[in-house]
Image (spheres, helix red, strand yellow):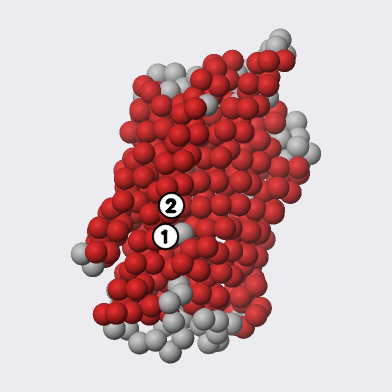
Amino acid sequence: MTDTPSQTPSATQGTGLAFAYVTTLFFAWGFATSLIDPLIAAVKKVFDLSFAEATLTASAWFIAYAVVSVPAAAVLSRLGYSRSIISALFVMVLGCLIIPVATIVDQYALVLLGLFVIASGVTLLQVAANPLVAALGSRKSSHARLNFSQFFNSLGTTLGPWLGSTVLLTGGVFAAGAVVTEATRAESLRSIDMAFLGLGAVFAVVAVFIFSARKKINAAAATSGGDAGVSSPLKAFGSPWALLGALAIFVYVGSEVTIGGLLTNFLNRPEILNLPEADAGRMVSLYWGGAMVGRFIGAILLTRVRAGVLLAVNTAVAAMLCLVVTQTSGTTAAYAAIAVGFFNSIMFPTIFTLTLERSNAPAPATSGLLCTAIVGGAVLPLIGGQVADMTGSLNPVFYVPLVGYLILVGFAVLAARAKVRDGDAVAAPAGH
């Protein structure tokens, strides 16, 4: 893609409107993804699970990225942006309808299936939306633009745990002094139904909204050179930078989800803050809220600071905070864990655009591989849950993201030193 200074004012306005429409999607999938955090605490108690078994909710969600992302790139190439996005939203509605069936028959395995279906739709949504946002505007501002959209993603992830904890972690088995009986379990299962039926309704509304704006999105993408085109997703495997970026996404998402997924239980521990589950779950909003604030600040900084340099700073600080959590308790450990969210803020979109601008594979293929790597959110939390079960403590779990952030420091340094590929790179380095 190249800058198009000859665009008419109406074309520029159309691109801006399309960007606004697509940004609503970032909010929707952020809200949905962050519901996993209070859901882990909910299913652990309702279904009487170990930490490792409860984190399967995150695994069921994020394993969809490994299964669906590469095929999703092929779907994007065939259907184009708007039809792919609308299809993804309807798949997400279907997944939300599976959850009430699962709770009615009282089967945790079916809950996992419903989460997998929802996440499959989210995967297609991300494969389409991330490169589309990068394409809708100037190359030089792509880092800042994607971070701005991710700000709204973080708004969704901030509201998700707050509202989700209020619905999922109150009443039933979570009521003060309640014991686990068939009646209290039934009440908590109905709360899970309510949460996901409401989520499905939101997805349906967004689908109608995007359908009404489909012509503007398609026209703006074509004007900006952001047509998805036809390319094999397998082409990304021939690009060293696409593979390196996939590793970075794998460890970043795995690290972020490991912390967020177990944070409710962590803050609930007597040696940390000893909060009731609902209050601890609502506090997780601070973790995701830090990412929201950080992305807003990051969108500004990335217009002045090289993306690789800023990424190196954030990953190094996140690693240090994880180290603090492993060695402390009480409020020090609690707020160090929460503070990691602020430094997570720019990581995903910056890794994404740094990879896109260095990969010599087509953008849809590279995007498909990067989204496949989000499966790290299925693998690392499961490892963290096993560490918690073996040690009987949640502090040692933070060694898992600590190693992940150290790997990301290495990626950031390599990216800062590497040259952007010539030709139609999707983005140019911020600060150049």
SS state under label 2: helix
| Residue at screen point 35% across, 51% down | 96
Q: Report crowding for label 1: few under 14, some 14 to 19, many 20 or more residues within 10 A (C-alpha).
A: many
Q: Where is residue 392 in the image (x, y as percent from the top left)?
A: 41, 83
| Residue at screen point 62% across, 33% down | 20
Q: Where is residue 412 in the image (x, y as percent from the top left)?
A: 62, 46
Q: Mark 2: which amino acid?
A: Leu
Work out which quarter of the rendered image holds the N terminus and state it: top right
- Where does label 2 land, which residue? 199
Which residue appears farthest toward the bottom when viewing the image?
Answer: 177
- Distance between the Cα atoms at labels 1 and 2? 6 Å
Work out which quarter of the rendered image holds the C terminus and state it: top right
Q: Where is residue 7 in the image (x, y as percent from the top left)?
A: 69, 12
Q: Mark 1: which amino acid?
A: Ala
Please tell me whether residue 77 is drawn above or below residue 143 in the rendered image. Answer: above
> Relative to residue 376, is residue 286 drawn left or right?
right
> Relative to residue 145, is residue 391 drawn left or right?
left
| Residue at screen point 52% across, 26% down | 213
Q: Are marks 1 and 2 in contact (CB under 8 Å)?
A: yes
Q: In which quarter of the image is residue 293?
A: bottom right
The front one of 313 and 43 is: 43
The front one of 48 and 203 is: 203
Q: Can residue 75 be seen in this view?
A: yes
SS state under label 1: helix
Which residue appears farthest toward the right when viewing the image?
Answer: 304
Q: Which mark is residue 195?
A: 1
Q: Which mark is residue 211?
A: none
Please tell me whether residue 154 is drawn above or below residue 22 in the rendered image. Answer: below
